[in-house]
């Protein structure tokens, strides 16, 4: 009489499944990385063109956006380009394509916390608190 297992896979099956998943992940990464590089370069060129390259004092081509306080916890974190001019801070998200502009005159404080809206990173974040158009703070 032969008996079959109760639905649990052998160690070999688990290793094979993990190897297949890892392989799929590598193939997917190899396909996506060039697309993301092109998108990053396109957004950076757009940012420099729109602001005027000669007006940009400082820029970082790849930063993480952790969200706006007023919009709450449900925001999607995203990568984008960040630039500073004499008059504003400008962030252009890669995907979805969004932009945020903060006039330098509206900035109330700058901090470097490790987390914002429940999202954490090992390195310090740049948190800019500013007066919104309605007179509130964001």
Image (cartoon, rainbow, N blue to C red):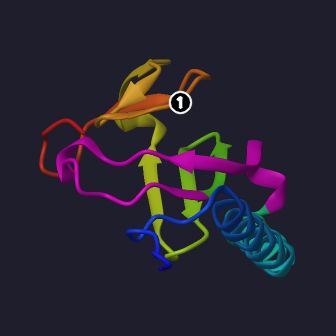
- Residue for point 79% across, 71% down: 29
Q: Which residue is mark 1?
A: 121
Q: Could you tell me if residue 36 is visible in this image?
A: no
- In terms of depth relative to the viewer, which is nearer, 89 or 54? 89
- Residue for point 56% across, 44% down: 87
Q: Could you tell me if residue 38 is visible in this image?
A: yes
Left or right: where does residue 126 sit relative to residue 133? right
Residue 60 among magenta residues: yes
- Against 54, residue 24 (above or below) is below
Examine the image and state in which quarter residue 10 appears: bottom right
Q: Which range is magenta?
A: 53-79
Q: Residue furthest front?
A: 1
Image x and y of residue 84, in percent: 65, 42
Q: Residues within 10 Å of mark 1 (few under 14, many from 20)?
A: few
- Against 104, residue 50 (above or below) is below
- In terms of depth relative to the viewer, which is nearer, 123 or 6? 6
Point out the image quarter for the C terminus.
top left
Left or right: where does residue 119 sit relative to residue 2? left
- Residue for point 64% across, 62% down: 14
Image x and y of residue 81, in percent: 67, 56
Image x and y of residue 5, in percent: 45, 69
- Residue for point 45% across, 75% down: 3
Examine the image and state in which quarter residue 30 appears: bottom right
- Against 19, residue 1 (above or below) is below
């Amino acid at each position: 009489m032969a008996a079959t297992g109760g639905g649990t896979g052998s160690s070999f099956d688990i290793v094979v499944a993990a190897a297949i998943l890892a392989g799929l992940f590598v193939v997917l990464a190899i396909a996506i990385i060039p697309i993301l590089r092109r998108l990053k370069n396109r957004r950076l060129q757009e940012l420099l063109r729109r602001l005027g390259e000669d007006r940009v004092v400082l820029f970082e081509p790849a930063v993480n956006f952790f969200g706006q306080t007023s919009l709450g916890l449900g925001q999607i974190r995203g990568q984008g380009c960040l630039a500073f001019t004499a008059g504003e801070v400008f962030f252009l998200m890669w995907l979805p394509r969004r932009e945020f502009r903060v006039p330098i005159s509206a900035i109330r404080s700058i901090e470097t916390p490790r987390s914002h809206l429940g999202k954490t990173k090992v390195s310090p974040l740049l948190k800019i608190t500013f007066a919104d158009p309605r007179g509130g703070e964001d």
